[in-house]
Image (cartoon, rainbow, N blue to C red):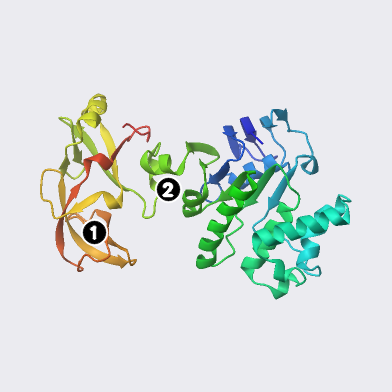
């Protein structure tokens, strides 16, 4: 099912400003679209408008070409999974999963077949006759997913469904949700504030901030070509190192004038209109090369080392106190207070207009 949002906006009564506005978005059939953003950016409001649980103030919503603005939630052929599992505690797992089908007066044989099919897919068959209080948080989340699956809806809507799980279980459930999506081939819209969930699960990411879309695209696009400084600072763990400065004779000169970087020829051409102007230069933590003291190198002191096993994050300081984060293989040996030269890989440099915050190269 293809979903289109044309100039969608929401303004709550009594509030001066719109919560979200000017949302233009196309979600293709079978997409796993993740709506990402910080708390309060409007992502759950947007999901609720798609579900029909919140009215649309302006703009148009289409499912498969049909305008849905005034269509009741029960008639939208959607299945929704909430952050709180919202299971009936007095019902068994089987009864929870079958409930919506019973309300629609489906035949018992159809209900039984769908519940067993969903339970097998989610590997919870052995818990069908247990109560929610008798199973773990991860299993309860699977039951909530199973309740949505049995409806065989055209669209799956998920509002931070993994936020109540511990870190290890969240990691496991991310993989399970991707497998589930591939198996069901249903259009899915997933809301989260966790950029790791977005990067690992989505076929398409929509990043919101203050009710506006900052960028739409694949996880790879977000990582390799962030559209503006907000996206650059939000996507990636650790986030992108951002250095402020200006363009001087085609080179990037840091604000403190403690280092100069010569961009690659293609970037120098794009930066010509910014000669003498303030720009920001970004570089990912893995784009530093140890031990090369040349014209595109910086000298820093290691302040803190965060060992993660296969990699280590070096939190480094310049003499003036400015900081950066550098990722190195875990088997390299570093010590706190050591000084090192790191070459900046010019193929991995990102440049942004300080005035507009938009990407240049």
Residue 325 x %, y %: 28, 56
Q: Residue at position x 20%, y 36% from top?
A: 263
Mark linked to residue 234: 2
Residue on which the image places disc 1: 316
Q: Position of residue 31 (x, y in %)?
A: 58, 40
**Residue 117 screen position, x and y as percent:** 72, 57
- Is residue 21 at all visible to an observer of this figure? yes
Q: Residue at x 52, y 52 (%)?
A: 193
Marks 2 and 1: CB-CB under 8 Å? no
Residue that protrudes farthest toward the top in the picture: 273
Please say whether residue 85 is visible from this viewpoint.
Answer: no
- Looking at the image, the residue that sits furthest to the bottom is 134
**SS at mark 2?**
helix
Q: Is residue 179 left or right of residue 263?
A: right
Which element type, helix, strand or loop, lies under badge 1? strand
The image quadrant that residue 169 belongs to is bottom right
Quadrant containing the C terminus is top left
Q: Is residue 132 left or right of residue 351?
A: right
286 shown above or below 23: below
**In the image: residue 56, left or right of residue 88:** left
- At 89% from the left and 51% from the top, the residue drawn is 105
First reached walking from the N terminus: tag 2 or tag 1: 2
For image coordinates 47% across by 49% down, the residue present is 199
In the shown orientation, is residue 341 left or right of residue 28?
left
Name the quadrant containing residue 340.
bottom left
The front one of 193 and 258 is 193
């Amino acid at each position: 099912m293809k979903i289109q949002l044309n100039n969608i906006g929401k303004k709550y009564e009594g509030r001066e400003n719109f919560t979200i506005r000017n949302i233009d978005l196309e979600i293709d059939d079978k997409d796993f679209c993740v709506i990402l953003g910080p708390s309060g950016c409007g992502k759950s409001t947007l999901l609720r408008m798609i579900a029909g649980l919140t009215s649309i103030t302006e703009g148009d919503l289409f499912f498969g070409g049909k305008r849905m603005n005034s269509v009741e939630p029960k008639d939208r052929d959607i299945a929704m999974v909430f952050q709180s599992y919202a299971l009936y505690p007095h019902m068994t797992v089987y009864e929870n999963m079958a409930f919506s089908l019973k309300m629609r007066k489906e035949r018992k044989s159809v209900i039984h077949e769908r519940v067993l099919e969903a339970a097998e897919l989610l590997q919870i068959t052995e818990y069908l006759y247990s109560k929610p209080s008798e199973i773990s948080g991860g299993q309860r989340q699977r039951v909530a997913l199973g309740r949505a699956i049995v409806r065989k809806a055209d669209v799956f809507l998920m509002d931070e469904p993994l936020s109540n799980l511990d870190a290890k279980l969240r990691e496991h459930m991310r993989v399970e949700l991707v497998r589930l999506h591939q198996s069901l081939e249903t259009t899915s819209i997933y809301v989260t504030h966790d950029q790791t969930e977005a990067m690992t699960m989505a076929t398409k990411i929509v990043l919101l901030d203050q009710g506006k879309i900052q960028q739409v695209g694949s996880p790879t696009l977000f990582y390799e070509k962030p559209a503006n400084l907000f996206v650059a600072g939000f996507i990636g763990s650790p986030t992108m190192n951002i250095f402020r400065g200006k363009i001087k004779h085609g080179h990037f000169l840091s604000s403190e004038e403690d280092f100069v970087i010569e961009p690659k020829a293609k970037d120098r051409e794009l930066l010509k209109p910014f000669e003498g102007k303030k720009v920001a230069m970004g570089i990912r933590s893995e784009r530093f090369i140890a031990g090369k003291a040349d014209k595109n190198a910086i000298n820093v002191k290691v302040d803190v080392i965060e060992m993660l096993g296969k990699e280590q994050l070096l939190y480094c300081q310049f003499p003036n106190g400015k900081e950066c984060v550098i990722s190195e293989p875990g088997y390299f040996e570093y010590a706190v207070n050591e000084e090192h030269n790191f070459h900046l890989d010019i193929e991995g440099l990102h440049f942004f207009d300080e005035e507009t915050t938009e990407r240049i190269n």
